[in-house]
Amino acid sequence: MKFVATLLTASLLIAACAVLWVDHSSPSHNETFVRAVESLNAGDSGPAKHLLRTLQRIEGFEQHCELLHGGIALKAGHPNEALTCFARIRPEGDIEHPALLWTGEALYHTDQLSVSLSCFNRIIEQFPDNQAAIRWIAAINFDLCAMDDALRHLRRLVELNPNDFAAHRLMGTIYFDFEKWNEAADSFRLAYQRSHGHPLRQKLGCELARALLLHREYEEAAAVCTELNVDESVLTIRAECSWIAGDPQDALKLLGQALEIAPASHKANLLSGRIKLESGDPELAIANLKAAIQSDPFDFDAHFILTAAYRQLGQKEQAEKQFATQESVREFRVRMAELNSRAIKNPSDAEVRLELAELCRNIGHIKLARIWEKAAQACSDTAPHHLYEPAQPETSRVNF
């Protein structure tokens, strides 16, 4: 009996240990999955691949592994392959949040904006403060030219994370496009102040200085330039500050340096032409103005100043021809402004976006035309979709 009792005691101890092992093993596997998701969200697929191989040996984690396969494909630049993986899972339990987030991202990269938006909206229905989903919603609204909605989500984002310089920057970009120089400068300033050590800091500084210049805060614009590396953009902004301060010679000297770095610089050529014309040298101004027009054929200011230069030289025939071009550019810009205004006021109007796309194609601006076509497609896309439907499934699979 003592032997039996001892045997039973030993059996109970073994069973208890087994129960404890099972109880502790499951959380550790869940933690492995969480670490893999965090690794992918941080942009590092290496650890995620290693953790995936660990999970593939665990029964009951097949859906988790399929999701990680898709996440790795997505971060490797294969959104269609990712969607193929996501089609084999359902967003339930602990995989729901990353599944919706990555599916929305993959759909965005395959130009399925409306379905992408529905994924991110599902996330914030459950997690209203989810910053990643809010950021994607703001970006999609920006692409759709739904600027009020974009700004609303960006404001929420900076409330949740005041140090998110990318959100401040996008707000500045929207305000800048609306020619709200004060608001643009405020947003760019916040972005710049929060970007220490980031590769975009130089560009952010230039954007801030440009907005300050347009808001006539010349001293602060010049001060920002002293903190930046000397490049074509910085030299051009400094030149404009000098010109405004009444020193055209220093301005032209700085612009000469800018054009040595970037001979095709639109802003440097335009400002050089303007200063030379005002200084009584229309002949030299013409070369810079033609270069400015070559880099941006639809800059009304460049055409207007070039017309004035021909008139100062007494070249009536050239002036009349240039004036006709100037007026056609003006009409184009007026039409673009009208359509843009309609698009902003009507975020779901596909027709106005197609008009904008056609207008851009007519002038050879194919990249911008495609952006408007994508926005129009998202607006008119009312057919039911499977959330995980790939656009054009890729034949290759990422090797893990």
Image (cartoon, rainbow, N blue to C red):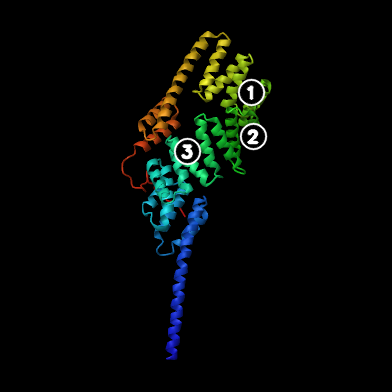
For the point 62% across and 44% down, the residue is 197
Where's residue 232, x and y in %? Answer: 62, 30
User: Label 3 is placed on what type of residue?
Assistant: Leu
Q: Is residue 327 visible?
A: yes
Say what secondary structure mark 2 lies in: helix
In this view of the protein, can residue 76 be seen by the observer?
no
Determine the image quadrant of residue 145.
top left
Dot 1: what SS? helix
Q: Earlier in the sequence, mark 2 or mark 1?
A: 2
Q: Residues within 10 Å of mark 1 (few under 14, many from 20)?
A: some
- Height in image: 298 above or below 148? above
In the rendered view of the protein, which quadrant contains the N terminus? bottom left
Residue designated by label 2 = 224
Residue 244: mark in rendering = 1
Instruction: Choose between 367 and 218: the one closer to the eye.
Output: 218
Q: CA distance from mark 2 to mark 3?
A: 26 Å
Near mark 2 (Cα within 10 A), the count class, few <14, some 14-19 or many ≥20, is: many
Picture quadrant of residue 212:
top right
Q: Position of residue 140 (x, y in %)?
A: 43, 40
Identity, as a three-letter code, of the amino acid under mark 2 = Val
Instruction: Write down the quadrant of residue 338 in the picture.
Output: top left
Real-space Cα separation, disc 3 to disc 1, in angstroms = 33 Å
Residue drawn where x is 64% and y is 16% of the image: 279
Sequence-wise, which precedes: disc 3 or disc 1?
3
Would you call the spot at circle 3 few (<14 residues within 10 Å), some (14-19), or many (20 or more)? Answer: many
Residue at mark 3: 151
- In the displayed structure, 72 sits above or below 153; it is below
Residue 89, position in %: x, y?
37, 54
Image position, residue 387 (x, y; %): 36, 48
Q: Identity of the amino acid at label 1?
A: Ile
Image disc number at residue 195: none
> Which mark is in front, 3 or 1?
3
